[in-house]
Every structure is written in C-alpha cells, then in structure tokens.
Amino acid sequence: MNGKLNGPHETFLITGVVGFIGFFLTRSLLDQGCNVVGIDNLNDYYGLNLKNSRLEALSLYDRFTFLKADISDKEILLKIFKEYKPRVVVNLAAQAGVRYSIENPDAYIQSNIVGFFNILEACRHHPVEHLLYASSSSVYGSNQKVPFEEMDFVDHPVSLYAATKKSNELMAHTYSHLYKIPATGLRFFTVYGPMGRPDMAYFGFADKYFSGEPIKIFNNGDFENDLYRDFTYIDDIVEGIERLICNPPQGEVQHEVYNIGNNNPEKLMVFIETLEKAFSNKLKRKVEFNKIFEPIKPGDVPATYASTERLQQAVGFKPKTPIEVGLQKFADWYVDYYKVK
C-alpha cells in the first residue's frame, strides 16, 4: 500500500460494521470513496434500534455492501472472502463488555475465539494486504505500572473478555509468522462518543438520568483513589485506524500491536461532572445525577492509561480530543436522537 487510502481501488471488509467503531470507520472510508463490504450478525447484546439507525445511514452509500453474517460461521466467511476479495480487513466483530463475560462466557468463546480464528483462516486462504483487529486495553489486567506500554507483560488477564483479546493477539502473531499475513492489533482504551454503545458507563448514566433513576458508581465512593480511565473519542480512534491501515507491519514476523488511547487519564468523577455540564449546556438547565456508590466489580481495573509513543512513531498521530469536547458532542446527539427535554 502506498501510504494513503486509494478510494475506488480499495475494497475493505469491515466486520462488526454496525457496531460503534465499525460504523464510524466505515462511514469515513465511504466518504473517501472506498468500497466497503460490511458484515454484522445484528445480535441483541444491546437494543437493535441504534444498530438499525447506523445501518440506515451506511445504506445511503452506493459503495457500501451489507451482509448479515456471523464470523463464527466459517463456511460463509470463506465464501465472502472468495467473492469480494478484500485487500484490507478490519475485524471489529466481537462480543464486547467485561462484566457480561461473567454472565455469558459462551458468547465470548464463540465470537472472539472461534470467530477470530475463522478470520485468520480466511486471510490465510485468500491473502490480504493488511488485517487489522480489535484488541483491548483490558489485556493489561491489573498492571500497576503506568502508562501501559505495548511491551508490558500481559499474561494475567482479570476477565474472560480480556483473555479472549490476549488470545487474539497470540493467534494473529502465529498466523503472521506461519503464513506471512500482515496483521495489526488495536488496543482501544474506553471509546466514547455519539451513537456509542449503550452498555458503556457514560451512555448508561444518561439513560438512568432521563429515566429518573440513580446512577451506580463502582468506586466505593473513594474520591481520592477514584478509578482512572483513558477516555478516547471516536474520531481519534477512526483516525488512528486509518493511519495504521496504510502502514502494514514489515519485518520477518509482520505483526504489531498498538495502543489507541487518549494518553490523558481522567478520574471517573471528573468525567461524570463533565457529562453533567455537557447536558446542562445542551438543555439550558442544571443537570445533576443522583449517585449511588458501590464496590468495584469483578474484572474491573483501577486505572487504564495508554502510552501512545509507538503509535506516534509509526504514523505520527496521538488521540487528542478533550473530554469537554467529546462529551458535549455526545450530549448534543443524545438529546436530539432521543428527543429528551
């Protein structure tokens, strides 16, 4: 690849295409004139209304092809690769969520392990110029050393979700070694923004407030030792992916892993106060959540904090959107989309 997106000459295969990141990445690629084949199984992990809204928006583009399929179905996946011959694959299909992995572990093995294996097999039999895939900041587990760097020891995951993502990195490395598949893992750090995932905390806080319910904060009410999160705005995630698309790994084993995080962790309570202000600005009235403090949940980690040096060295980019800007855009969208007052 020549360091830029080649418009109509590129065919991208995006899995999880009507998910949060999948939607925004696909829309950006389509706006640049690329062809995108999108796969999604439209599961009901969260309500389908939002996924259908994203799909409707993407369906307005002539260069977009949607296929309802599940990556855990190997036969269908191989047929799709054979027919559409994608040059670049971005695997964003996965069962997400740390806490849900405790309730429904089967879903994580099926999608994140079996499904990803099928993606690798498809890339093996139908070679691609670059495979990018979603990993997660959760692979760092309860590491005490911050900021998290890609070369840190990550063999002690504290949730099944994290374990599946670490497994993806190991599997991709192996396939790159054996079959020369250029592959890049993307360790995302707490992605947020308009049209985001309703299971994420900031979205849930908004839902609770407008339903007249209190929000639960899992930090024991300890403001001095509050949870820290590296909140990363969706536009920064998309730009990071697009820059990496054009820079497949080189070398004997063509596999790399990059953090995509804001490199500026915020206390959870500061994030919540900023969200309250954003809704106050949009609604022209004071918004204050009713808060209940509870113990930290199993699988949660005290802090996520990304080093972005490797990303900067590779593609000259680091996420930069402050939470004041990102949360205002979310609040504006939420009020308009749900028509709340």
Image (cartoon, rainbow, N blue to C red):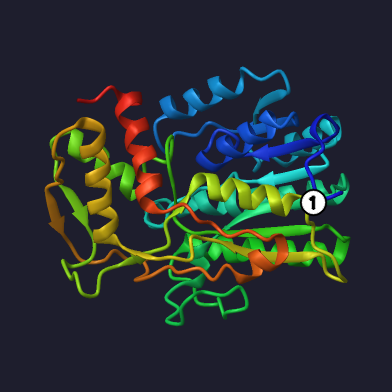
Question: What percent of the width, then of the height, locates residue 20?
Answer: 50, 39
Q: Does dot 1 land on a helix, a strand or a loop? A: strand
Front-most of residues 333 and 46: 333
Report whether 335 appears left or right of 3: left
- Where does residue 237 sit, x and y in percent of width and height? 56, 50
Q: Is residue 91 above or below residue 64?
A: below
Q: Is residue 235 left or right of residue 209?
A: right
Residue wearing tag 1: 130
How far from the left and from the top, in percent, is residue 304?
Answer: 43, 68
Q: Amino acid at mark 1?
A: His
From this viewpoint, is residue 117 visible?
no
* Residue located 54% across and 50% down the image: 236
Q: In what quadrant of the picture does the C terminus appear?
A: top left
Query: Residue at point 42% right, 76% down?
Result: 142
Count neighbours of disc 1 (C-alpha within 10 A) and say few if under 14, some if 14 to 19, many if 20 or more: many
Count numbered badges in the picture.
1
Q: Report the residue at 16% width, 40% height from top.
A: 287
Residue drawn at the location 34% of the way across and 41% of the way down:
328
